[in-house]
Image (spheres, rainbow, N blue to C red):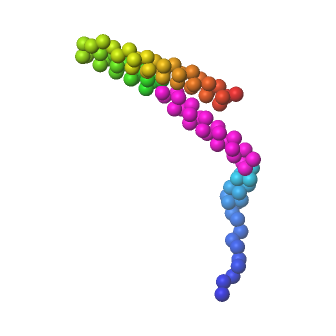
Amino acid sequence: MTSNTSKPMTEREAGRVALKELLKPISVRLLVGRTLAALGGVLAIAPYIALVKLGAVFYEAYSTGTEVDTARVTTIVNILIGTLVRGSRASALLWA
């Protein structure tokens, strides 16, 4: 025979339930904020990666004695400028 007694909530569990109820109306906004923060973090690092790639293209041309691949340089510079612009826009959205 089993008894149907429920254990009373501890103060910590009650706090978790109360916090969950308080955050329920803004949970979508919090998710959007976390997503934008992650995107901003990636876009903050991307220009440095593009600069390293650009340096590698120049070093490769220098070390092999060949001409610089202008198509690769143009692509990398476009990526560099694009990530800088998008990164600043993402930051503006976060702080707006």
Q: Residue furthest bottom?
A: 1
Kindly indicate the quadrant of the structure image that contains residue 92: top right
Is most of the magenta stretch helix, strand or loop?
A: helix
Kindly indicate the quadrant of the structure image that contains residue 57: top left
Whole-percent x and y of residue 5? 71, 77
Whole-percent x and y of residue 47? 48, 23
Measured along the vertical axis of the image, is residue 70 above or below residue 12? above
Answer left or right for 25 relative to 67: right
Residue at point 59%, 23% (across, down): 88
User: Residue 21 magenta-drawn?
Assistant: no
Whole-percent x and y of residue 20? 70, 53
Question: In which quadrant is the N terminus drawn?
Answer: bottom right
- Residue 15 shows in the view: no
- Residue 35 shows in the view: yes
Please tell me which residue lies in front, 77 or 90. 77
User: Residue 36 magenta-drawn?
Assistant: yes
Q: Give the range drawn in magenta.
A: 23-46
Q: Which residue lies furthest to the front in this view?
A: 71
Please tell me which residue lies in front, 11 or 75. 75
Residue at point 51%, 19% (across, down): 81
Measured along the vertical axis of the image, is residue 35 above or below residue 82? below
